[in-house]
Image (spheres, rainbow, N blue to C red):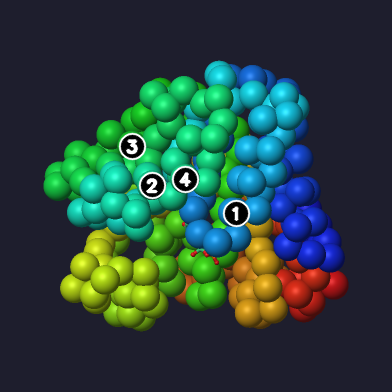
């Protein structure tokens, strides 16, 4: 595992964007695994700027996102489809047909999740999977649990996640109760993993994830078993890892 601790959020974003651009430089038709959340917003902005400057092209790139709420229309402003369009896809030269986000609007959870796994396989697997880190160690929507979920599946959101997300919706009743997410097994199959972590509120969980026991109660601890992980964090998040 490579741990890169830089000073600021902007530095973290730059280093992570460079890593993704290096994968694309190596193989213009690579497969990227992408994440939503606040942490990758800066690196997506860097990718957009570099694409506009002609430094990187997404013309032949394929993408698969980690997760999506169940039951939200793709154009709902809290859907991850919307987030990705808004932060990356609408601003780079990617072919929309090659972008994939779990179809949260498909009411058949088993079929939607199985189709997602098959699509990743059919694309040749993920070359580099970008991850953020939840405060409780979650990656994707894989929350602390008694075992590591293997494949893409439907999860019930915890009451605390529903409460936390309610600030983004008009009322708590509108907050989705379920989501579709890649499993830990799906994530671990990626050939490389790039996790970005920012802020002092993530310092404790980052230390646990990198140096604590590998247990499903800290889902991101599974990354210790992956052969090619790079964690890029700012100084605040990395404070307990120096
Ligand atoms: C997003 C995702 C989540 C986030 C995590 C951290 O697609 O799967 O696991 O990466 O919740 O979120 P932020 O970056 O907002 O702290």
Q: Which residue is mark 4?
A: 86
- In which quadrant will I find the C terminus? bottom right
Q: Earlier in the sequence, mark 3 or mark 4?
A: 4
Give residue 165's quadrant in the image.
bottom left
Q: Earlier in the sequence, mark 4 or mark 1?
A: 1
Name the foreground residue: 55 vs 152: 55
Q: Earlier in the sequence, mark 3 or mark 2?
A: 2
Q: Which mark is residue 116?
A: 3
Q: Residues within 10 Å of mark 2 (few under 14, many from 20)?
A: some
Q: Earlier in the sequence, mark 3 or mark 1?
A: 1
State how far apart marks 3 and 1 are (Cα).
22 Å
Residue 189 location, x and y as percent? 52, 41
State how far apart marks 1 and 2 are (Cα).
15 Å
| Residue 241 in sight from this viewpoint | no
Q: Which SS class for mark 2?
A: helix
Q: Residue at x 30, y 45 (%)?
A: 75
Tags 4 and 2 touching, CB below 8 Å: yes
Name the foreground residue: 219 vs 166: 166
Q: Nearer the viewer, mark 3 or mark 1?
A: 1
Tags 4 and 1 touching, CB below 8 Å: no
Q: Which SS class for mark 3?
A: helix
Does the Cβ of the disc 1 residue fall within 8 Å of ligand 1? yes
State how far apart marks 3 and 4 are (Cα).
22 Å
Q: Which mark is residue 40?
A: 1
Q: Nearer the viewer, mark 1 or mark 2?
A: 2
């Amino acid at each position: 595992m490579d741990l890169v601790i830089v000073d600021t959020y902007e530095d973290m974003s730059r280093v992570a964007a460079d890593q993704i651009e290096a994968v694309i430089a190596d193989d213009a038709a690579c497969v990227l695994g992408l994440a939503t959340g606040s942490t990758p917003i800066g690196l997506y902005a860097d990718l957009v700027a570099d694409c506009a400057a002609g430094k990187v092209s997404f013309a032949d790139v394929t993408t698969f996102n980690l997760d999506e709420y169940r039951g939200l229309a793709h154009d709902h402003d809290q859907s991850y489809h919307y987030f990705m369009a808004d932060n990356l896809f609408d601003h780079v030269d990617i072919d929309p047909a090659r972008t994939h986000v779990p179809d949260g609007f498909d009411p058949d959870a088993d079929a939607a999740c199985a189709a997602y796994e098959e699509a990743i396989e059919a694309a040749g697997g993920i070359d580099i999977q970008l991850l953020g880190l939840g405060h409780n160690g979650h990656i994707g929507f894989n929350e602390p649990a008694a075992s590591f979920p293997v494949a893409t599946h439907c999860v019930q959101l915890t009451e605390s996640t529903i409460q936390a997300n309610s600030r983004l919706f008009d009322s708590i009743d509108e907050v989705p109760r379920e989501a579709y997410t890649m499993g830990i097994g799906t994530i671990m199959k990626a050939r490389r993993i790039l996790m970005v972590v920012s802020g002092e509120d993530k310092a404790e969980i980052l230390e646990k994830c990198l140096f604590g026991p590998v247990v499903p109660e800290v889902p991101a601890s599974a990354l210790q078993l992956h052969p090619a992980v790079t964690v890029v964090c700012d100084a605040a998040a990395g404070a307990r890892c120096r």
